[in-house]
């Protein structure tokens, strides 16, 4: 059980499932950052999937990345400036659309992704141990998301009267 801090309102109820999942996400990100720092990885923890997809595609617009990641264009664009500042990606203008920028990983970005690749082996093993202890959280999250896509929350609520 997680360490509980008393709250003035009853926010540790199932109604606040999103909050609990977000707390887990933040905890995972914080602890992953510690691992990244130890391994010399400068890719922001919450940008690893974006970097992985970009390296796989070679070049991509923010819209392409958003589509591949299943995120909003806005969320992708929030991550881009830091990746540019860190020298992990670069961009050029799209020859066919002056409003579009095409992003690609830099050599440093690819080098960092190689370090991340080595790190994933260690993280995967750590998660295997965690899942042996608490159950496969990833499968649970995927099943819950699939169930909510199939039957959204509003359809799961019985109408009063």
Image: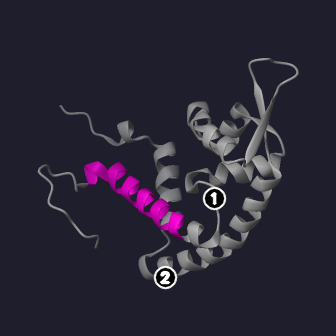
Say few, some or many: other residues with alpha carbon within 10 Å of mark 2 (under 14 / 14 to 19 / 20 or more). Answer: few
Asked if residue 86 lies left or right of residue 1, the reply is right
Is 130 rendered above or below residue 66? Answer: below
Magenta highlight: main SS: helix
Q: Which mark is residue 42?
A: 1
Is 16 rendered above or below residue 38? Answer: above
Q: How far from the left and from the top, in percent, is residue 103?
A: 77, 37
Instruction: Compare marks 1 and 2 and give the one earlier in the sequence.
Output: 1
Displayed quadrant of residue 65: top right
Q: Quadrant of the N terminus?
A: bottom left
Q: Do the residues bearing badges 1 and 2 touch, measured as CB atoms within 8 Å?
A: no
Q: How far from the left and from the top, in percent, is residue 54?
A: 76, 46
Nearer-the-camera pick, 68 or 96: 96
- What residue is disc 2 on? 132
Say few, some or many: other residues with alpha carbon within 10 Å of mark 1 (under 14 / 14 to 19 / 20 or more). Answer: some
Q: Secondary structure at mark 1?
A: loop
Highlighted range, magenta:
14-34
Q: How is the image coloured?
A: one colour
């Amino acid at each position: 059980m997680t360490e509980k801090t008393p709250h003035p309102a009853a926010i540790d109820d199932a109604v606040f499932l999103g909050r609990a999942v977000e707390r887990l996400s933040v905890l995972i990100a914080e602890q992953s950052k510690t691992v990244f720092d130890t391994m010399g990885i400068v890719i922001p923890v919450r940008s690893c999937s974006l970097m992985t997809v970009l390296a796989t595609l070679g070049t991509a617009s923010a819209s392409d990345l958003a589509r591949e990641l299943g995120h909003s264009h806005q969320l992708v664009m929030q991550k881009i400036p830091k990746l540019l500042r860190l020298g992990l990606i670069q961009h050029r203008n799209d020859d066919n659309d002056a409003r579009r920028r095409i992003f690609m990983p830099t050599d440093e970005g690819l080098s960092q992704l190689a370090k991340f690749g080595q790190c994933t082996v260690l993280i995967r093993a750590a998660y295997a141990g965690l899942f042996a202890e608490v159950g496969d959280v990833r499968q649970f999250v995927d099943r819950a998301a699939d169930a909510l896509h199939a039957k959204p929350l509003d359809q799961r609520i019985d109408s009063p009267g």
